[in-house]
Amino acid sequence: MAPEVAHPGPSRVRRMRFFAVSFLFIAGIVNYLDRTSFSIANTSIRADLGLSGTRIGALLSAFSLAYGIAQLPIGLMLDRLGSRVILAAGMFVWSLAQMATGMVSSFGGFMATRISLGAGEAPMMPCGVKVMNDWFSVRDRGLPTGLLTASNTLGVTLAPPVLTVIMLAFGWRAMFVSVGIFSLLLSLAWYPLYRDRERVALTAAEAASLGLEPEQPRMEMSLRVWKRLFRLRTIWGMMLGFGGINYTTWLYLSWLPGYLQAERHLTIARTGWVAIIPYLFGTLGSVVSGGASNRLIRRGIAPITACKILIVGGMFCSALSTLGVAYTATATGAVICVSIAIFFIYFGGNAGWGLAQAMSPAHMVASVSAIQNFGSFVCASLAPIITGWLLDHTHSFHIALMICSLATTLGALSYWFIVKDPIDAGIE
């Protein structure tokens, strides 16, 4: 049998798809520019305001904690209120927090803006996943989801050169304000231009292009059902599995420049450019994963099976590549292994977002995605701490990289053996 091909939907659906994917791709880049700006400016902030390294670390952790905790209510709010309202509000909050960061002069002021930034950015990925689920049929949503996740790595890639240029030209305060203003303009564009699918009266042809029944009733997510999700084996398997993905992601995000300088003896200037290479591979991994997902599903492989194949395959390849980082003898070999590891972890991570869609009824997608992200965030937050402690005691990244490889492998096994049954709307 010849493989199925995707057919373009009616023009109104095509326009909404194009707008949503384009907007979320740009917003994803800006999200990571905002998220990494404090790391770029922390040396200048310390010099200007006399903040200790411990206080800078506390501010970095405040963002992470606020972001992780906010995932839980955000998912339920997205399923109940829709992406149009929640993302607009989230972007507005994070934009104001970013701009305010350029105006504060005390530790307490910085703490307030970092917590606000984390809470404001929390809707971005669950909202993106819900939008893809709403406006793309199951056989078409892999690639747009890949573009969404690719925007994150592209943001990480662009942040050092873009933000450094702004900071050197105008100062760190102007850097925060200028990036915040751009985010604010984006937030003001989303609400008037986007429409939640549930609040659009679809024609029969439009519903068919999305794989929906013409008269399919609208279901709503409740707090009671949301609580019941935590009783499901599948949910816990997804949290642990995605934890393996984000452990690797956060280890490299937090420690790659330090690793290249301390372990491979690269200069600071050279590190700034070399560290870009792996994240270009990560961007490519997300896009390739999305295309592969579409292709497998159109060939008749069940969406859950297709996503699990890509997740587990990607995670095992990343784990092996991280071991290669630990044992390779040269700096060039290490950069190659890191690039392959990041390519495959984003390859698997994109499929992890796809699995959240495949496992969930449509009215639960944001909640399930956010819970998966929250659980993974708890696991991932250990990576910088464990790596730093091992570095202090062993003066080497060797054991930390081996632990990272093990965490990724355990995450892959969790996806394969624990994540079994789809989340049934019958839990209601």
Image (cartoon, helix red, strand yellow):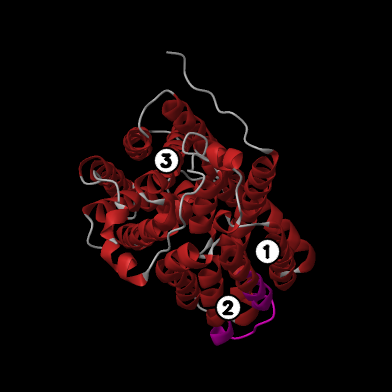
- Residue depth check, mark 1 versus mark 3: number of the one nearer the observer: 1
Coordinates of residue 377 in the picture (x, y in percent): 38, 60
Identify the residue at horizontal 62%, vertical 36% (top origin). Answer: 9
Is residue 60 in the magenta section?
A: no
Q: Is residue 251 above or below residue 428?
A: above
Q: Position of residue 412 (x, y in %)?
A: 28, 42
Disc 1 crowd, CA 10 A, few/some/many (<14, 14-19, 20+): some
Identify the mark at residue 296; answer none if there is no mark: none
Label located before the other in sequence (2 or 3): 2
Is label 2 in a helix, a strand or a loop? helix
Dot 2 amino acid type: Thr
48 horizontally vs 125: left or right: right
**Label 3 crowd bin: few (<14), some (14–19), many (20+), radius 10 Å:** many
Q: CA distance from mark 2 to mark 1?
A: 24 Å
Category of crowding for the residue at label 2, using alpha-carbon neighbours closer than 10 angstroms: few (below 14), some (14–19), many (at least 20): many
- Is residue 8 visible in this depiction of the protein? yes
Residue 43 visible to the viewer: no
Q: Which callout, 1 or 3, points at the residue further toward the start of the chain? A: 1
Query: For mark 3, what is the residue?
Result: 351
Which residue is rendered at x = 57% and y = 62% of the image? 35
Q: Amino acid at mark 3?
A: Ala
Residue 71, relative to residue 310: is it above or below?
A: below
Q: Nearer the viewer, residue 110 or 98?
A: 98
Q: Amino acid at mark 1?
A: Tyr
Look at 42% across and 71% down and name the residue there. 73
Question: Where does label 1 land, which residue?
Answer: 191
Residue 113 badge = 2
- Mark 1 lies on a secondary structure that is helix
Q: What's the magenta region?
A: 94-109
Q: Residue at x 62, y 63 (%)?
A: 34
